[in-house]
Image (cartoon, grey):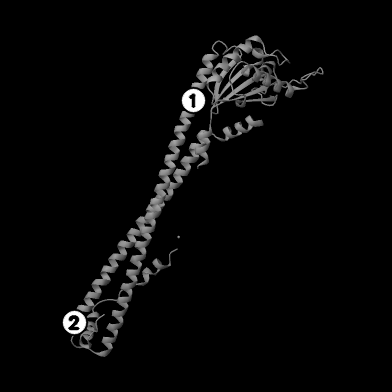
């Protein structure tokens, strides 16, 4: 700063009396702010993969990001308002300082006391101006930080949207595969559906349920001729759909099995023996890879009807062939979240 002559200071002091002091305390707070078997394991994984809940969870995550972005945008708007206010006050102070300098040039005479007061006021004005400049720089830095954070949140949201789209596409493809497989199985088993055999879709799988009367005699695990015919038709479909995993589950009713000393001791043995018999029929004379098949017995513990009636027990005596498409790509997408 240039040296101010005694005569100019006196002039500045006299003019300064006409103006009020510049308030500064209201900005202090701006500086003080601070910021069952292998199949049972597959069933558990599939049951946990409830598609609708996955979408709901994803939508909740996206909503959380949207809420963060809205909060950041509100904070950004507040910072922009503070910057505009700080710039306005800065300009006011700058104008006041210019006025004081002009008054200094106009004052030719004065006394020493007034000169000292004017010097103190000039010094205070310079310090206040410097503080406002520092505050403005800090606010602008904060604004840049908020912009960066908003950009990062936007990028993360874009990535999540891309992964969600990929997941939806894979789910659609999987559902299409399951529908196509069900249609192929239904076509192959035409004539058997409604005659002790049903084909349905559940949990992203195709279920082929065969009543006991279609496959076995009561208490036996030897498959009847009609049952073998149905299984051979099903095998022709499974033979060409090589990515389908095949699980055979034997189910009994809750009537205890009366053992005659043979290989069957109870309902557990009977359900397992029936499932392994079905496996052998499916493999016999086909190119189905045995690694794709799993045989299991569920005994009486997974009934479709819990009533203690003849009709309910007949429904529960069944064999289910569960066809599961390859879910490796779907698991990969889910694990990436």
Compute the Cα span from label 2 to label 1. Answer: 90 Å
Q: Taking 50 as reference, is 124 left or right?
A: left
Q: Is residue 286 above or below residue 28?
A: above
Q: How many marks?
A: 2
Q: Quadrant of residue 81?
A: bottom left
| Image x and y of residue 268, in percent | 73, 24
Name the residue carrying label 2. Answer: 105
Q: Position of residue 220 (x, y in %)?
A: 72, 15
**Quadrant for the N terminus in the image:** bottom left
| Callout 2: SS | helix
Q: Residue furthest right?
A: 261
Please tell me which residue is depicted at 69% across the width and 16% down the height of the picture.
310
Crowd around label 1: few <14 · some 14–19 · many ≥20 (10 Å): some
Q: Residue furthest bottom?
A: 112
Left/right of residue 148 with respect to residue 196 in the rendered view: left
Relative to 108, is 19 above or below? above
Q: Residue at x 61, y 27 (%)?
A: 291
Which label sits in the foreground, 2 or 1? 1
Which sits earlier in the primary sequence, circle 2 or circle 1?
Answer: 2
Q: Is residue 298 visible?
A: yes
Residue with the mark numbered 1: 177
Secondary structure, mark 1, is helix
């Amino acid at each position: 700063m240039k040296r101010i002559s005694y005569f100019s200071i006196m002039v500045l002091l006299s003019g300064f009396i006409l103006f009020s002091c510049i308030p500064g305390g209201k900005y202090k707070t701006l500086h003080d702010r601070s910021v069952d078997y292998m199949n049972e394991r597959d069933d558990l994984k599939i049951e946990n993969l409830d598609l609708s809940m996955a979408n709901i969870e994803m939508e909740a995550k996206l909503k959380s990001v949207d809420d963060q972005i809205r909060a950041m945008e509100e904070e950004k708007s507040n910072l922009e308002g503070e910057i505009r206010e700080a710039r306005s006050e800065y300009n006011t102070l700058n104008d006041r300082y210019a006025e004081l300098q002009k008054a200094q040039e106009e004052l030719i005479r004065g006394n020493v006391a007034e000169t000292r007061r004017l010097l103190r006021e000039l010094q205070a004005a310079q310090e206040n101006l410097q503080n406002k400049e520092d505050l403005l720089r800090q606010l602008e830095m904060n604004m840049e930080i908020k912009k960066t954070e908003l950009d990062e949140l936007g990028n993360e949201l874009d990535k999540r949207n891309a992964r969600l789209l990929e997941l939806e596409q894979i789910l659609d493809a999987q559902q299409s595969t399951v529908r196509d497989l069900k249609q192929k199985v239904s076509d192959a088993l035409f004539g058997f559906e409604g005659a002790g055999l049903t084909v349905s879709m559940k949990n992203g799988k195709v279920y082929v349920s065969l009543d006991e009367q279609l496959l076995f005699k009561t208490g036996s695990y030897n498959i009847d001729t009609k049952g073998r015919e149905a299984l051979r038709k099903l095998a022709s479909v499974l033979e060409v759909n090589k990515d389908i995993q095949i699980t055979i589950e034997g189910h009994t009713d809750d009537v205890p099995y009366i053992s005659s000393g043979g290989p069957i001791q109870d309902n557990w043995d009977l359900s397992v023996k029936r499932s392994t018999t079905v496996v052998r029929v499916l493999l016999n004379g086909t190119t189905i890879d045995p690694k794709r098949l799993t045989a299991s017995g569920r005994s009486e513990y997974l009934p479709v009807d819990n009533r203690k009636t003849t009709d309910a027990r007949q429904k529960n005596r069944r064999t289910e062939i569960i066809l599961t498409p390859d879910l490796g790509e779907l698991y990969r997408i889910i694990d990436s979240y």
